[in-house]
Image (cartoon, grey):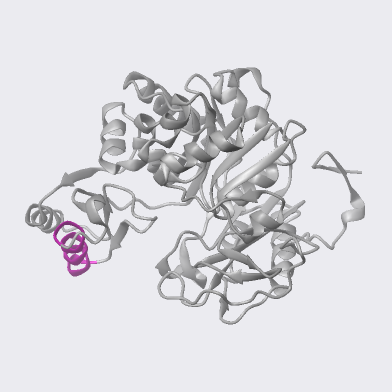
Amino acid sequence: MKILVVGGGGREHAIIMKLMQSEKTEKVYCTPGNGGIAAAGAECFDVSATDIEGVVKLAKELKVDMVAVAPDDPLVLGMVDALQAEGFMTFGPKKCAAIIEGSKVFSKNLMKKYNIPTAFYEVFTEADKAIAYLKEQNSYPAVIKADGLALGKGVIIAQNEEEAIQAVREMIEDKKFGESSTRIVIEEFLTGPEVSVLSFTDGKTMVPMISSMDHKRAYDNDEGLNTGGMGTVSPNPYYTEEIAKECMEKIFIPTMEAMNAEGRTFEGCLYFGLMLTPKGPKVIEYNCRFGDPETQVVLPMLDSDLVEIFEAIYNHELDKLDIKWKSGSCACVVMASGGYPEKYDKGIEISGLDAKGQIECCEVYHAGTKLSDSKFLTNGGRVLGVTATGLTLNGALEKAYDGVKKIDWDKVHYRKDIGQRALKALDNDELHLGYKDDMEDYIEENGVYLRQ
């Protein structure tokens, strides 16, 4: 099977590496791709991920059997619809279903209509009315969200009235995020551990993947600006079996059924951003695709054929698969350009990687790299995701950070506390077991660690 993957970041690299493990895969293409994806053996093309006509044309020229659309923008624009109209097997939701991420107002109204637990909210299109509401509520922190897509930057957590008013005026009056912020959502600030759960669904069956924990702030101790994600671990220790069951009953299945009832059947990867509040789990956000960098710690734990899963979703036969996961943990440390998420330089040579853009002890997922004259150069804010699996979370983290130390470039930046909150939440005898310690006590069978 020849497969075209649309996108060019760390998420796409992780998807491609898993697709390449399938016996069904003959060839993988990617557009636009990046240096690491090209070095992994996927032929890359210079067609933008949002160029619907260009991607359809490319798929025809390559005569591919499947197109997997990974980023949010092309999904919301209707790329899957256009590809299916030309007869291609696809992975990803149609435009009518991708609105669950494309519009915060739609998703909040959906949850309200179908009694899916989420934060209390109001919608505004006029700055003065929004400000009057904020003054009336006088409750901080307050969460202010742009309605549409904003590159992951359309959410402001205002700590006081001054910050809230500034955010409202910038979004509605100054159109900071263009048309995406002509409508805004103001919602209550929820507290509790955050959990990300990606789920496979074909509209009939919902199969949650292994949970994960993202680290959004730029600096250690969750300080600095919000980013696209500075690191991730899986599974998330706060997400217990009991909570997973509650989420399945009150959030996951009801969301799938709500979309069906609205005539917007969701087929693909539905991402649930959850807050485990004192009153139970609530939805912070939906995404209509694999998360980034959550994908980088979820797919390495998948012990089933990803191509078969994509096919089953397209054919509405997900219920026929028994999707399996590896035991242990996975950790990803994002190495970013100095200055990210604001101003940063590009084109800086990266040292420490081999010819395939990898290192010996870890999987390195390329997010913002360019391959030039056999050299890897930085080409974005988030550059690499150094990822490792281990018997324990501590072991996975040790291995990932050992990998980070082998890679360098001028002004490289990364957090040094990825996974520390998760480690504190764990309560087991193997908390301090590292990947270099006591491994003779275990044997590995198909990714599952067993005590001898």
Quarter of the image with the C terminus is top right
Q: State the residue at coordinates (27%, 66%).
A: 159
The number of callouts visible is 0
Residue nearer the viewer, 237 or 261: 261
Quarter of the image with the N terminus is top right
Residue 302 visible from this viewpoint: no
- Estimate the x, y position of residue 101 in percent, counting from the top left: 37, 41
- Estimate the x, y position of residue 71 in percent, counting from the top left: 47, 46
Q: Is residue 112 magenta?
A: no
Residue nearer the viewer, 19 or 152: 19
Which quarter of the picture shows residue 371? bottom right
Residue 97 visible from this viewpoint: yes
Q: Is residue 36 above or below residue 447?
A: below
Q: State the residue at coordinates (26%, 47%).
A: 147
Q: Main secondary structure of the magenta part?
A: helix
- Estimate the x, y position of residue 5 in percent, counting from the top left: 57, 42
- Estimate the x, y position of residue 240 in percent, counting from the top left: 58, 40
Residue nearer the viewer, 406 or 46: 46
Q: Is residue 166 magenta?
A: yes
Q: Is residue 156 left or right of residue 365?
A: left
Which quarter of the picture shows residue 93? top left
Q: Over which residues does the magenta segment extend?
A: 160-173
